[in-house]
Image (cartoon, rainbow, N blue to C red):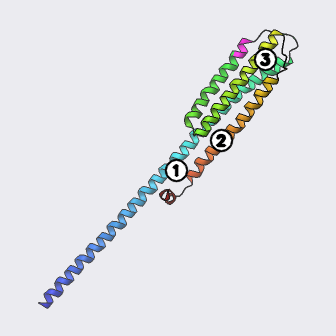
Amino acid sequence: MTAILISVVGVLGTIMGAALTAFVAARTERRKERSLVQAQWHDLRIEHQRWRRERRQTAYLSFLEALGTADRDNQSFFRELRARRAPVPIDETRIAAIRLKFKEAEGAGLVVILEGPEAVAEGAQNLVNQFSSLVQQVRDYAEAVAAGSPASGGDDVHEAGMKFIAARKDFLGLARDALDDVTKRVHVHPDADQAR
């Protein structure tokens, strides 16, 4: 009887040991799977952040390039107006071309507003508003030249130009911060995400 009891205890011990080993192995496997899933999610987040940064950078650059093209034409027109000594009719074709380039820049600005983040969107809208004001000031100056009375000598245009330059500088800072923020998120370790 003792031998049977020892055999039963041995068999039960073996079964319990096997069950415990299977339990530990299953937990270890679940941890591995969870760790693998977390690593895959982290990789997906990194890929998404890279994709997001590239889209934003492309949008920001397209916006600034379109705005720069319109600004160069607007400046050139203003310099030509200032160089004139006699009243000349308004060059509506030139003003329309500048306005068209401004609308293209404004369209590129809408992409920036969509891409965000909020601070960059606000900076883009402010930049568009400042440039719109500058374009209007040049048009007003052209009308004054055509009427033979450019009394201010373009001071209003200069002031609007300085506001535009300040808004562009602000936008560049906001855009750079937004792009750097995306880069910082890409370099976050997966364990750091769990701590949040």
Name the residue beneath numbered marker 3. Answer: 141
Q: What element carries label 1?
A: helix
Residue type at mark 3: give it.
Tyr
Query: To which residue does mark 2 refer?
Result: 174
Q: Distance between the residues labelled 2 and 3?
A: 32 Å
**CA separation, marks 2 and 1?**
22 Å
Residue for point 26% across, 75% down: 18
Counting from the top left corner in percent of width and height, residue 73 is at 74, 23
Neighbourhood count class around disc 2 (C-alpha, 10 Å): few under 14, some 14–19, many 20 upward: many
Q: In this view, does 159 lie to the left or right of 44?
A: right
Against 190, residue 24 (above or below) is below
Q: Give the range drawn in magenta.
A: 88-95
Which dot marks residue 8?
A: none
* Crowd class of label 3 (few under 14; some 14 to 19; many from 20; radius 10 Å): many
Instruction: Identify the mark nearer the N-term, 3 or 1.
Output: 1
In the rendered structure, the answer to whether residue 185 lies left or right of residue 161 reads: left
Label drawn at residue 46:
1
Q: Observer-nearest residue: 88 or 32?
A: 88
What's the amino acid at mark 1?
Answer: Ile
The residue lying toward the viewer, choosing from 190 and 150, is 150
SS at badge 3: helix
| Image quadrant containing the N terminus | bottom left
Within the image, what quadrant is residue 114 found in? top right
Which residue shows up at 18% across the image and 87% down it? 6
Are the residues at dot 2 and dot 1 in contact (C-beta closer than 8 Å)?
Answer: no
Question: Does 161 lie within the magenta span?
Answer: no
Image coordinates for residue 151, horizontal then vertical, percent: 85, 16
Q: Which of marks 3 and 1 is in front?
A: 3
Q: Above or below — where is 92 with respect to 13? A: above
Name the residue type under label 2: Leu
| 4 or 171: nearer the viewer | 171
